């Protein structure tokens, strides 16, 4: 009988073309194409969006074959019970960009078709399945509890607490999903998707009673830990083999049932609520999150164990939480560790009580330890895998402590006397537009379970692995990222450049599909502004960005605009900063800050700043009278500063000439660009903020 690796190797050798699943999605704007062909390559955190340009297809294939050969050798060394737990991760690592040998053209990777087939191979005796969903509710209440009224600046413990609580949410959904599967004796192939605080399982239909018992047990423990701030809601629908080809209808039923559950959470559980004991021993600080937030940024591994007794952490590891279950009378524990040596030490210390262990590399697909850092002087199975997280947390390079938001907002200045300069902090909230419609209608009749699983996984990879890579590049604090949404904080200018690059990468990742996009809201404030308020203000501006049919926008400096224009305005702002000075230099006049402020007022007064339903005026809509008045005012200001029409033509400095021309074209009733004139608020504010907060530094 052929092994799973044999089928994978056959798929690698067949080299079937794989196309992007995003090319199948249409909500009316996108043209369906089959042009975006993926290159076969090993899955890494760096390869989510881009392939190494300097490698040929043959080199990529050789690299894949070599890495696969090495991992197969490591896999065969595992104890037999650990292999089913490890296999899905290796199938994903090598099969995510490989097509299926059964078809000549496909947008479903070998890895996703294989894992769905494995789940479908285990129905109940009558051929039915349960599509089961777990959803963590109260996430924002949990993360910001007792933080809303506090002041952020200078409070390092607050930054750690925020990091810890958001990490807990990200860890908990995976931990719960795996605990369900282990209690039911099922492999990770039955996990369809996990991320963004929820997970989906496909399991035999005859396990419904066991699921209900487990859910009650898990919720009781969660109440003990999180005091009802964070709860697990579940829903399930019965389905048959038809889910393979038409999964959309079942997922829609699942979402409707879950929505109804939100209004009757814990119904019928009163006896358990009133009999709930006080917090479990050793978990008093878990819901606070401070210790987890302090330690997680330095950890490379996540460890999940089952044991007959509670196990203790050791040097280099930290116990996050533990769940005892009544059915199998075992304890599920969650640890984090700095590396394989620390993980090995933990397992050896508790080898008499551990039944099994799973070790996951964080944001790294090289999952096996070296022989020098590992010793299997125990009898229980240990499996290996990987998980992606959006988790970047800027650290102080000298103290290795998490930066508080006041430090994060400071400008990068070389002059030591200016390092205490006050900075501006920005927060951004974003999510994918119309994602429900994308999943329910975007694939039309092609909503197979494999295709929906591929789409979920692809979005999950982008908003965890790739998102984190960009956050590291721009020094952005990822408070939360996963699934299809995120909330981040950073120095104002770094965050704007991060947002621009994130959007450009998402366009490339989604095959430039016009129906796949996200909207974002940015709020800027003093770093001492309460972080809970930052979230609320960023969410408000995100909703403003989504307030039109087009969506696909970003709201920044209190102005929503399209992403393309946003990118252009950042470039204009950078150009404006380069030529902004306080004095004229010879015959070549310079922009001054005063002129920039006057231009800012001209732009603002050319549009309605408030919505007045009685007069049919909308905020941001052009005020024709003021706009016409400001056209002549604009030309007057330019001429007064030495930028007459003739002078602009004579200017040899391309940046200055281009800036003047773009301003004048925008303020012209006869030019199509006039409707984007208000977008220049971004360019002007960007340049002025750079001078004010960053000492004229520019990225």
Image (tube, helix red, strand yellow):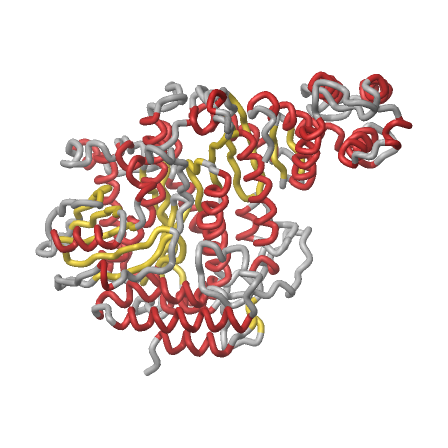
Q: Position of residue 518 (x, y in %)?
A: 57, 43
Could you tell me which quadrant the C terminus lies in? top right
- Can the viewer see residue 612 in this picture? no
Left or right, residue 394 beside residue 294: right
Which residue is at 41% across, 63% downward? 93
Could you tell me which quadrant the N terminus lies in? bottom left
When the figure is inspected, residue 20 is found, relative to residue 634, above or below; the finding is below
When the figure is inspected, residue 373 is found, relative to residue 227, above or below; the finding is below
Q: Position of residue 675 (x, y in %)?
A: 77, 32
Q: Position of residue 587 (x, y in %)?
A: 83, 24
Left or right, residue 21 beside residue 170: right
**Which quadrant of the structure image shows residue 653?**
top right
**Which quadrant of the structure image shows residue 280?**
top left
When the figure is inspected, residue 133 is found, relative to residue 449, above or below; the finding is above
Q: Position of residue 264 (x, y in %)?
A: 35, 37
Number of numbered discs overlaid on the protein picture: 0
When the figure is inspected, residue 158 is found, relative to residue 15, above or below; the finding is above
Direction right: furthest residue:
646
- Can the viewer see residue 266 in this picture? yes
Direction bottom: furthest residue:
1
98 or 236: nearer the viewer:
98
360 or 373: nearer the viewer:
373
Which residue is at 31% across, 54% downward? 360
594 or 366: nearer the viewer:
594
Which residue is at 36% across, 31% downward? 162
Direction left: furthest residue:
352
Which residue is at 24% across, 46% downward? 335
């Amino acid at each position: 009988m052929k092994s799973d690796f044999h089928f994978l190797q056959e798929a690698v050798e067949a080299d079937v073309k794989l196309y992007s699943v995003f090319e199948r999605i249409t909500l009316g704007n996108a043209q369906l194409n089959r042009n975006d062909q993926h290159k076969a390559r090993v899955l890494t955190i760096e390869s989510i969006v881009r392939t190494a340009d300097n490698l040929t297809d043959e080199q990529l294939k050789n690299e894949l074959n070599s890495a696969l050969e090495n991992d197969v050798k490591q896999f065969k060394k595992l104890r037999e019970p650990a292999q089913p737990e490890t296999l899905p991760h290796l199938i994903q690592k090598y099969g995510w960009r490989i097509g299926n040998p059964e078809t000549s053209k496909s947008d479903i990777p070998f890895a996703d078709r294989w894992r769905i087939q494995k789940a479908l191979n285990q129905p109940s005796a009558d051929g039915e399945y349960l599509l089961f969903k777990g959803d963590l509710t109260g996430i924002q209440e949990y993360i910001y509890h007792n933080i809303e009224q506090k002041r952020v600046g200078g409070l390092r413990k607050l930054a750690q607490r925020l990091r810890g609580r958001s990490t807990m949410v990200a860890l908990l959904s995976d931990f719960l999903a795996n605990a369900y599967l282990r209690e039911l004796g099922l492999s990770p192939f039955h996990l369809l998707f996990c991320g963004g605080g929820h997970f989906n399982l496909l399991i035999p239909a005859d396990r419904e009673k066991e699921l209900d018992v487990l859910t009650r047990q898990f919720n009781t423990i969660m109440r003990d830990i999180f005091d009802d701030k964070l709860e697990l809601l579940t829903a399930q629908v019965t389905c048959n083999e038809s889910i393979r080809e038409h999964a959309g209808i079942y997922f829609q039923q699942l979402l409707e049932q879950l929505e109804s559950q939100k209004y009757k959470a814990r119904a019928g559980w009163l006896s358990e609520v009133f009999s709930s004991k006080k917090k479990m021993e050793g978990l008093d600080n878990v819901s606070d999150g401070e210790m987890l937030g302090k330690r997680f940024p330095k950890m490379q591994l996540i460890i999940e164990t089952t044991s007959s007794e509670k196990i203790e952490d050791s040097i280099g590891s930290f116990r996050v939480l533990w769940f005892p279950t009544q059915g199998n009378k075992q304890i599920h524990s969650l640890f984090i560790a700095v590396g394989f040596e620390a993980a090995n030490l933990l397992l050896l210390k508790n080898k008499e009580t551990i039944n099994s262990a799973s070790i996951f590399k964080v944001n790294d697909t090289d999952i096996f330890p070296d022989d020098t850092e590992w010793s299997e002087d125990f009898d229980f199975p240990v499996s290996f895998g990987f998980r992606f997280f959006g988790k970047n947390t800027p650290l102080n390079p000298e103290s290795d402590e998490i930066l508080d938001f006041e430090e994060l907002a400071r400008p990068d200045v070389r002059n030591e006397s200016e390092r205490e300069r006050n900075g501006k902090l920005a927060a951004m909230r974003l999510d994918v537009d119309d994602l429900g419609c994308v999943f329910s209608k975007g694939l039309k009749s092609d909503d197979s379970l494999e295709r929906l699983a591929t789409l979920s996984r692809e979005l999950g990879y982008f908003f965890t692995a790739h998102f984190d890579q960009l956050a590291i590049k721009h020094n952005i604090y990822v408070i939360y990222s996963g699934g299809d949404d995120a909330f981040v904080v950073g120095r104002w200018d770094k965050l704007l450049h991060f947002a621009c690059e994130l959007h450009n990468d998402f366009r490339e990742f989604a095959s430039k599909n016009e129906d796949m996009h996200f909207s974002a809201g940015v709020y800027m404030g003093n770093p001492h502004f309460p972080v809970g308020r930052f979230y609320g203000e960023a969410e408000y501006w995100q909703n403003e960005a989504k307030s039109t049919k087009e969506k696909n926008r970003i709201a920044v400096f209190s102005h929503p605009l399209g992403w393309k224009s946003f990118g252009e305005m950042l470039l204009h702002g950078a150009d404006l900063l380069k030529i902004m000075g306080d004095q004229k230099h010879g015959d070549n006049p310079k922009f001054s800050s005063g002129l920039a402020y006057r231009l800012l007022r001209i732009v603002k007064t050319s549009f309605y700043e408030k919505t007045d339903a009685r007069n049919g005026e909308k905020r941001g809509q052009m005020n024709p009278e003021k706009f016409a008045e400001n056209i002549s005012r604009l030309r007057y200001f330019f001429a007064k500063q030495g930028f007459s029409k003739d002078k602009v033509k004579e200017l040899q400095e391309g940046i200055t000439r281009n800036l003047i021309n773009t301003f004048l074209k925008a303020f012209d009733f006869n030019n199509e660009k006039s409707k984007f004139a208000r977008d220049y608020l971004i360019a002007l504010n960007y340049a002025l903020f750079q001078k004010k907060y960053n000492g004229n530094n520019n990225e």
